[in-house]
Amino acid sequence: MNVQAGTPIVEMRSVGKAFAKPSGEPIPVLVDINLALHEGEIVGLLGRSGSGKSTLLRIAGGLIQPTSGAVFYRGQPLTAPAAGIAIVFQSFALFPWLTVLENVEVGLDALGLAPAEARRRAMAAIDLIGLDGFQTAYPRELSGGMRQRVGFARATVIEPVLLLMDEPFSALDVLTAETLRSDFIDLWIQRQLPTKSVLLVTHNIEEAVLMCDRIFVLSTNPGRLAAEVPVLLPHPRDRGDAEFRGIVDELYATLTSRMTEAIGAQGKIHGGLVQPLPAVSANRIAGFIETLVARPYEGRADLATIATALDLDVKDLFQVAEALHIMELAELSGGSIKLTAAGRVFAQSGTDDRKRLFGEHLLHFVPLVAHIRRVLLERANHLAPSVRFESELEDHLSSSDAEQTLRAVIGWGRYAELFTYDATTRAFSIP
Amino acid sequence: MEHHAEVLLGEVWNQRIPSWRDAVAVVLLLAIIMLLGSGARQMVQPFTLSQPSAITLAPAALPYYALRTTMRMLAALVASLLFTLTYATCAAKSRRAEMILIPLLDVLQSVPVLGYLSFTVVFFVALVPGNVLGPELAAIFAIFTSQAWNMAFSFYQSLRTIPTELDEASRSFRFSGWQRFWRLEVPFAMPGLVWNMMMSMSGGWFFVVASEAIAVGSINIALPGVGSYVALAIQQRNLAAVGWAILAMTVTILLYDQLLFRPLVAWADKFRYEMTAAPIVPRSWVLDLFRRAALIQSLSAPLGQTLRGMVRARLTVPRPRWPAALTPPQRAADLIWWGILLAALGGLGRTLARFAEPEISWGDVGVAVADGGLTLLRVIILIVLATLIWVPIGVGVGLRPKLAEKVQPVAQFLAAFPANLLFPVVVYLIVRFALDPKIWLSPLMILGTQWYILFNVIAGASAFPNDFREAATCFRIKGWRWWREVILPGIFPYYVTGAITASGGAWNASIVAEAVSWGPTRLDGSGLGAYIARMTAAGDYPRIALGVAVMSVMVVGMNRALWRPLYALAERRTRLA
């Protein structure tokens, strides 16, 4: 689609969002976001979990107010949900007590239409999205794919100018997601939708390349627009196409370089004590190393290739990769992952040696683990409440990041037998 | 309400031709309307306090009495619903209102229901002088106090836990406050509300029976109803009449369940938030009948459409906006608010002190507390006894699905049955065999509420995962170890829920259970319940208030010190994720 000039549909100027800590100190989630959506384009927001991309979408929808900067919808400041903006939710967000037809009509309630007119428009939307025959069904009778179709019908029935999609396909299985995506793209390129512009939030790189005209990559902690990648391929796009693969690889490379940069930068703050860690189980790490060391990878793989081969969710893949990179069991660079010498030794060791190696790397490369271990050793009873470390983390991380980091540390420390954790007393100890 | 509309509108496959279903449905509908109408007319009859309406012990009068009793239940239910929708909504929407309303609800909940009655009856009689409506309102209020609080709590909890996604969807579709209330909040809260309504109803029968024959000091009222019938039977030592009353009540509760609650539960199933289909879909023949009756459907369609239209209307209320310059900063506003609250509290406290000072000495407080101790001891012993009896039986039943299916409705019925109708039978036995009332009156307190333990334990044992049972069998865990390590932890959360209800019910029942009579014979088991009952008979308001206050404090204390920690423990320990 051609990008047209003129007033943008939505424009963000130096938008920032920070959430207040219990201590009152703000934790920035989004920093200095400048972006504009123009008529006729689908724009993708790509980022790992915790990059604030869903927050950004909600700011565009007027559901959340930014703490700094300003948002304009068709040139007017946006301070509340506006007519002409609709959202498709990851979890569908259907009302379970309303039928399909009533769920679609819900979108029209705010417009105050006559019942007959509302019914006519709802039926038209149901027809367009391929829900005919399901009008009287309740959402719980439908499959995930049909539910999201209701989500689409409910959003398009109000004839939105701007359609916001928050990971709309990520709760669906691979095949269903593919059908829904291509159905949507068909409607879009045939201009059957009154929608002028679409903002798509996703962590699925191929999905972004399949659907979007421009893709923004968000970095994490705090979220910034790190790169903008245009996709000029005509629809329908072919995943096997060399140019398509090229863009996918480029995006993988961008995301991994952002990640390694972030890990490096966080390692410098407070001696790396408040580095957010991905909650990946030790079992998963071990399994990934074993896969990587075996054929056909033999210690080195492109993330894009391995994601497709293992049918791994990109979010999960990045979490394992991040954990491996932090512990220096593998190294990320330019969209590929390579086992380090230690990683290879790990793969060939028995259980006890693996635990020892894992523990050594934890103490070396995860300052928080070393810190907990040190505190426990210093104390006569070798006991420390987790609150002690939680509060340190929560001063610098969002509460969900802090919780996830603590969960990761507990799991890894237990596996390496560096310390144990009692969930009832919420305390770390060394037996 | 909105969703009746949807039921009445029905499914599209309805044939619009009258059928046999219509005939049955019309007869059922007309009968209910006529009965309720005649009952309502009776409620506003002129009435003089000196001449209580004559109650007859003829069994033929019982259907009419049962109708009057049912009317009171319905009226109280409607009042409770109105209260719930307003009170809980205020508490959930305004942070400042929440500061008073929620703690207040907590206190209101722990005041013994019959304690309210002594105070309010005078007020209501004075409110509508010379009309039976006054005492009727007092009785209705008593039932209201037995069900409104937990319904309001449930609704408030639901409003506070609206899922983020639905909240965001409603906001992005720009629902007005009115639309949001009926489209999102009420439906989301519905399953919890219906469940709590059912639980309160079970308790409600107890209080409706207790509040029909009211004697506070010189005021002596016998409202036509099953409760008054039994009171008269007790006065005349007529055991056969007691039997008839028990029969009438049984039929009434069964009808109520079939005609009101089954349909309600079956209908409310669609409001479950879970996206999965329920393993067992609750069904009701009454609801099915009305849903399939074509004539009823087409006649009620316009009504349904109107209701639906009302719910979908935007109805925005223009909010007066303070100029920003005049709005005090939040901190300051909070301070002012707290100031007003403290002043009001202080004023109330002083008034109370002035009211109590000349009447009540520390000696009185000592007596009430000592009596309270005795009742507390009874409650604890009874709960322990009921646990020892019903937990093994409940587990035994619950692990046999076929048996559980048969026993569960019976246990639920027994929990709903007003145990005070059975009191005369027990009292007769005590008098007959000259037993010590201090010991033998005690079981009456838990007669009605022990069933909550039974049916919760059955529910827990039925829900116990089969994998765990098989694992236990596989590892040959048997005998006491099986109880301690397998089944008791498994049913613990269910047991705690049941025991909380049973204990609360026992406190409430103590007022009618610790002091009973059989004809001219009066049995006093002493204890706080007997204390309140004595003071009520004497019309000694300051001491009624003292007794009620002591009981509230003890109930709150027991909840905080025992049940809440147990409940928290149950929640923590039995979750896997």
Image: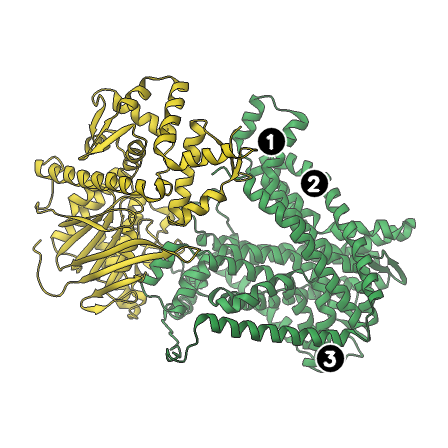
- Viewer-nearest of discs 2 and 3: 2
Image side of residue A250 versus residue A428, left or right: left
What amino acid is at disc 3?
Phe
Q: Are marks 2 and 3 on the same chain?
A: yes
* Identity of the residue drawn at 13% across and 50% down: A213
Across and down, in percent, residue B238 comes to 84, 59
In this view, the residue in front, B494 or A119, is B494
Q: Is residue B77 above or below residue B374?
A: below
Res B390 label:
2
Query: Which residue in the protein does label 1 denote?
Result: B486
Chain of the residue that carries numbered disc 1 in the rendered image = B
Chain of the residue that carries numbered disc 2 in the rendered image = B
In this view, the residue in front, A183 or A44, is A44
Across and down, in percent, residue B170 comes to 35, 61
* Identity of the residue drawn at 67% across and 55% down: B251
Q: Find numbered disc 3 in the image and state the secondary structure of the residue it sits on.
A: loop
Chain that the image shows in yellow? A
Chain that the image shows in green? B
Res A252 label:
none
Which image quadrant for residue A194? bottom left
Which image quadrant for residue B504? bottom right
Image side of residue A214 versus residue B305, left or right: left
What amino acid is at disc 2?
Trp
In this view, the residue in front, B66 or A336, is A336
What amino acid is at disc 1?
Val
- Viewer-nearest of discs 2 and 1: 1
Query: Which residue in the protein does label 3 denote?
Result: B47
Across and down, in percent, residue A333 comes to 20, 34
